Amino acid sequence: MIERTGAKFSVSATTRTARRGEVDGREYWFVDDETFENLVRSGGMLEWAEYGGRRYGTPRGPVVEILESGTHVILDIENDGAHQVKAAYPAATLVFLMPPSRAELERRLRGRGDTDEEDVARRLSVADEQIQDAIETYDHLVTNDDLETAISQVVSILREPATSDSDPDAPAGAGPAAATRSDSV
């Protein structure tokens, strides 16, 4: 998707521990609770949310730099964060990636091999809430039943001109594209 649109992907920060194979600054910026809290208090987070007892957020600085160049930014965020982004950048395009069905979402969660029964049940409940919220508030819903088709749909959405109708201090010429994935909650 990045190659097909010229968009840049935003790397989120998290207070969770890195999993095997994850690299700081590639999958996430792995930070401690104090560092995360300082970023929130100082306005250094564009959006943030707590999920599963850990905090996740998008550092504002890199997003602003990309937007100032007139380039779309793709954020992989939860619904709470998407609402925060939309408040800061009303022109942001919110795209929600939906699982084809609840049964398929459950199959995907179990297939990861790192999710116990209690976590599967919790994640399915969260997904139900996120999907309902997405239907009411997102600009686009894309069903991820075939990866290439879903990517093509998002690419088509992102080919629209980047604009910004955010506050006067926000960068002109671009708005972030926030994608929330319920297919991997």
Image (spheres, rainbow, N blue to C red):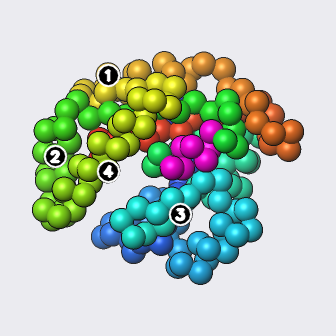
Residue type beneath disc 1:
Thr
Residue 145: image location, x then y, percent: 24, 28
The secondary structure type at the circle numbered 3 is strand
Looking at the rendering, the stretch of residues picked out in magenta corresponds to: 80-86
The secondary structure type at the circle numbered 4 is helix
Disc 1 to disc 3, C-alpha distance: 29 Å
Residue hosting label 3: 13
Task: Kindly report the secondary structure that dominates the magenta region of the rendered protein.
Answer: helix
Q: Nearer the viewer, mark 1 or mark 4?
A: 4
Q: Is residue 45 left or right of residue 56?
A: right
Mark 2 surroundings within 10 Å by alpha-carbon count, few (fewer than 14), some (14 through 19), many (20 or more): some
Question: Which tag, 2 or 1, sits closer to the chain's start?
Answer: 2
Residue 69: image location, x then y, percent: 75, 38
Disc 2 to disc 3, C-alpha distance: 26 Å
Question: Which tag, 1 or 4, sits closer to the chain's start?
Answer: 4
Question: Which tag, 1 or 3, sits closer to the chain's start?
Answer: 3
Q: Residue 58 in magenta?
A: no
Residue hosting label 2: 106
